[in-house]
Image (cartoon, helix red, strand yellow):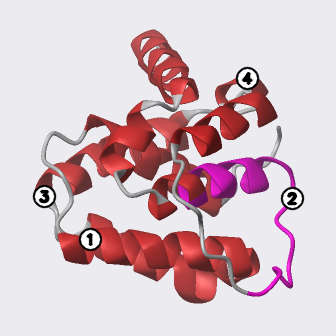
């Protein structure tokens, strides 16, 4: 993957930081995360205009999450490119989706389809954000552990 789009780095850094978070989200944070998931599902191209701001409203006021997010974001920014095998594949997304048995209420069919890697990360955020226990669901995303290993190796070699 040649593109290191802002949304891919932001979403990946958020998922890594959220996975490391020791304290569970409060009700407002969970509601905000559900809204991010809903927007990624229905309007993924509204990233710059709306979704990124919503996500940062979850991250910024939470000191532990923000510190971890900034750490991962800087590591991802330092990579020349994000290797394909660090991103979730279809099997992992299906497995994560199966973990959360609660039905997901879906609105209108998305007008703008996300593409490629952006779509894969959006799907993970939608699944995590829509789950009843997002803190547990994100810990099941095994691709994040591989991502952390690659980041730590690449930063040791720099």
> Tag 2's secondary structure?
loop
Residue at label 1? 29
Mark 3 and mark 1 in contact (Cβ < 8 Å)? no
Q: Residues within 10 Å of mark 4 (few under 14, many from 20)?
A: few
| Residue 81 in view here | no
Residue 20: which quarter of the image?
top left
Closer-to-camera residue (61/126): 126
Asked if residue 66 is among those painted magenta in the image, a careful observer would answer no
Cα gap from disc 1 to disc 2, whole angstroms: 27 Å
Horizontal placement of 36 versus 66: left or right? right
Cα gap from disc 4 to disc 3, whole angstroms: 30 Å
Closer-to-camera residue (131/92): 131
Residue at label 4? 85
**What is the span of residues highlighted in magenta in the rendered image?**
108-126
Residue 115 tag number: 2
> Tag 4's secondary structure?
helix
Q: Residues within 10 Å of mark 3 (few under 14, many from 20)?
A: few
Residue at label 3? 63
Residue 82: which quarter of the image?
top right
- Where in the figure is residue 21, as x and y percent of width and height? 22, 42
Cα gap from disc 2 to disc 4, whole angstroms: 17 Å
């Amino acid at each position: 993957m040649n593109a290191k789009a802002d949304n891919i780095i932001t979403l990946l850094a958020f998922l890594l930081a959220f996975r490391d978070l020791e304290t569970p989200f409060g009700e407002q944070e969970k509601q905000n995360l559900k809204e991010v998931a809903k927007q990624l599902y229905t309007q993924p191209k509204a990233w710059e205009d709306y979704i990124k701001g919503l996500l940062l409203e979850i991250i910024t006021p939470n000191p532990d999450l923000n510190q971890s997010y900034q750490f991962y974001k800087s590591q991802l920014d330092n990579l020349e490119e994000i290797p394909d095998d660090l991103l979730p594949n279809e099997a992992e997304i299906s497995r994560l989706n199966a973990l959360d048995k609660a039905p997901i209420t879906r609105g209108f069919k998305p007008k703008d389809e996300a593409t490629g890697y952006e779509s894969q990360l959006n799907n993970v955020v939608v699944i995590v954000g829509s789950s009843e226990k997002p803190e547990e669901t994100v810990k099941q995303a095994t691709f994040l552990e591989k991502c952390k290993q690659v980041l730590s190796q690449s930063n040791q070699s720099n």
